[in-house]
């Protein structure tokens, strides 16, 4: 699949990352699509019917291409005892927020088969996958339906798996990215060994022939220019769009991105049991070191706590997902953000071409000494 097959779908090389949990609402995806980027819906944590209704709503808002992201079902590898110990540790949080802990056994597959059926019965232009790669026959069935497919990779080996399965492109996710890392296998030994985006793009380019969508901490047009120069066909931005007017993120979450109280991000298992990057708050500091590798059990367990904290407007108890560039967030309408990013990208490309032209024709262009 050529890179042009991907970029022909949308005029600008900007993809709005699918952010589960109510952030990537149809209004956000539509605004990005109308501005020339690729808007995305996040199917994660929704019912199949809920996904269908959101697709229907998005189609009423725009006739331009958009994408839907699915979470892959997770293998049963959590230790029940570890989850029970963590639940005991969270008892004080439940008492504080006056709520019960969730049932850790509320389901492992996120309704994957039912959502896939929706996407095959009502094909959308683009479908991406997180936490793994579907079977080749699934990707082929989507291709026959006219859908362009992508899957996330956090290493070159995972990118090879994406290519082998038959996806049309790979989303290369650097460790800088906010929210959940899309590693295909959750190995606690790898919690502190993530690869930076630019280094990862180079490794993946040397390993596969697929078009690359680069993701991880991107907030400015100059950064988009950098990943395109490194070999990506497009850039995927999450945190940058989380702060926009159309985003479904809680107001407290949006404000926290640039609040001086939150100075850094960290990968944590505290809220879901899988590594995810968020702003360091009280909950993350107190529980992150003890959270087990147990997704989605921990996600289900903490769901009522996160909901109660959000209802109370308590940023210290919420999962404030954010990439490393969060302080650069801008409170703009999503369409205007796309325009600003493209202006910055054009400016960066112009500066880059001027530097290249100078190097080519200057006396230093051949590497000689003055």
Image (tube, rainbow, N blue to C red):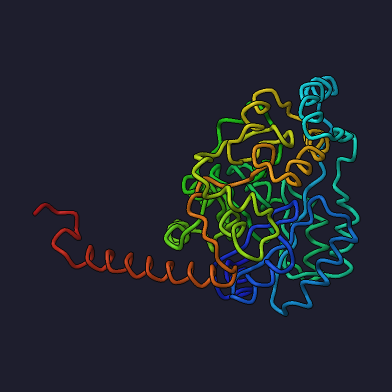
Q: Residue at x 80, y 20 (%)?
A: 85
> Horizontal and vertical percent for residue 188?
67, 28
- Looking at the rendered image, the quarter that the N terminus falls into is bottom right
In this rendered view, identify the residue nearer to me: 115 or 94: 94
Q: Name which residue lies at 61% across and 44% down.
A: 154
Direction from residue 130 to residue 110 in the image, left or right: right
Q: Is residue 212 visible?
A: no
* Residue 350: image location, x then y, percent: 34, 70
Query: Looking at the image, is 326 positioned above or below residue 34?
Result: above
Q: Is residue 227 above or below residue 147?
A: above
Q: Nearer the viewer, residue 109 or 309?
A: 309
In the image: residue 106, left or right of residue 317 = right
Residue 216 placed where, x, y %? 55, 50
Which residue is outermost to the left?
370
Look at the image and tell me whether residue 49 can be seen.
Answer: yes
Percent x, y for residue 343? Answer: 44, 71
**Which of the 4 quarters of the picture holds residue 312?**
top right
Q: Residue at x 53, y 44 (%)?
A: 176
């Amino acid at each position: 699949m050529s890179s042009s097959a991907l970029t022909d779908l949308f005029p600008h090389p900007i993809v709005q990352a699918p952010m589960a949990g109510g952030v990537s609402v149809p209004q956000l995806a539509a605004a990005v699509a109308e501005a020339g980027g690729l808007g995305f819906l996040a199917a994660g944590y929704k019912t199949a019917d809920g996904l269908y209704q959101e697709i229907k709503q998005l189609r009423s808002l725009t006739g331009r291409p958009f994408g839907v992201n699915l979470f892959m079902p997770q293998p049963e590898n959590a230790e029940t005892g570890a989850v029970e110990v963590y639940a005991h540790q969270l008892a004080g949080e439940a008492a504080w927020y006056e709520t019960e802990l969730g049932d850790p056994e509320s389901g492992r597959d996120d309704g994957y088969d039912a959502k896939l059926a929706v996407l095959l019965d009502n094909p959308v232009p683009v479908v991406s996958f997180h936490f793994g790669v579907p079977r080749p026959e699934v990707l082929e069935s989507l291709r026959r339906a006219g859908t362009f497919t992508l899957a996330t990779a956090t290493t070159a080996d995972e990118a090879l798996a994406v290519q082998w399965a038959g996806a049309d492109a790979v989303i290369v996710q650097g460790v800088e990215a906010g929210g959940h890392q899309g590693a295909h296998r959750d190995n606690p030994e790898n919690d502190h060994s993530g690869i930076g985006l630019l280094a990862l793009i180079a490794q993946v380019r040397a390993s596969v022939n697929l078009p690359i969508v680069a993701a991880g901490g991107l907030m400015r047009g100059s950064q988009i220019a950098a990943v395109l120069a490194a070999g990506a066909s497009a850039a995927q931005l999450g945190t940058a769009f989380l702060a926009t007017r159309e985003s479904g993120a809680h107001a407290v979450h949006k404000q926290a991105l640039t609040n001086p109280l939150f100075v850094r991000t960290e990968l944590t298992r505290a809220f879901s049991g899988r590594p995810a990057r968020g702003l360091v708050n009280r909950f993350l500091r107190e529980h992150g070191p003890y959270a087990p590798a147990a997704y989605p059990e921990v996600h289900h367990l903490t769901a009522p706590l996160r909901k109660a904290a959000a209802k109370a407007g308590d940023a210290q108890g919420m999962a404030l997902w954010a990439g490393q560039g969060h302080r650069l967030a801008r409170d703009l309408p999503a369409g205007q953000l796309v325009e600003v990013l493209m202006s910055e990208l054009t400016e960066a490309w112009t500066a880059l071409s001027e530097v290249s032209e100078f190097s080519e024709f200057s006396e230093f262009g051949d590497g000689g000494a003055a």
